Image (cartoon, rainbow, N blue to C red):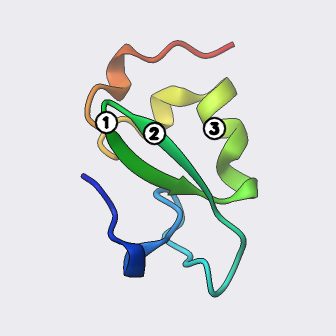
Amino acid sequence: MTNTNSDKQCLVCKKTSTEIPVTKFYYQESEFYICPQHMPTIIHNPQELIGLIAGADKFKGV
């Protein structure tokens, strides 16, 4: 699921870039956005992204 320019929202909490800063990242040639509050999810608890990103079931946390 790739976000469009008008859809810059955190994939976890759904807050938009007009509400909170978001950072863009890429996975499998798709782009996603995540806010600073949920950035640790990618690093420490990637299993929480299952259902939000295709293939997240293969992620390993630190």
Residue at point 47% right, 27% down?
47
CB atoms of marks 2 and 1 within 8 Å:
yes
Q: Residue 53: x and y, percent?
A: 33, 40
Q: Residue 14: x and y, percent?
A: 48, 70
Q: Looking at the image, is mark 1 or mark 3 nearer the viewer?
A: 1
Q: Earlier in the sequence, mark 2 or mark 3?
A: 2
Q: Which residue is mark 1?
A: 29
**Quadrant (top left, top right, bottom left, bottom right) of the C terminus:** top right
Residue at point 60% right, 33% down?
42
Q: Which residue is mark 3?
A: 41
Check disc 2 and report its element: helix, strand or loop: strand
Q: Is residue 54 above or below residue 61?
A: below
Q: Earlier in the sequence, mark 1 or mark 3?
A: 1
Check disc 3 and report its element: helix, strand or loop: helix
Amino acid type, label 3: Thr
- Classify mark 2: residues with Cα within 10 Å, few (<14), some (14-19) or many (20+): few
Horizontal side, residue 16 vs residue 2: left or right: right
Q: CA distance from mark 1 to mark 3?
A: 20 Å
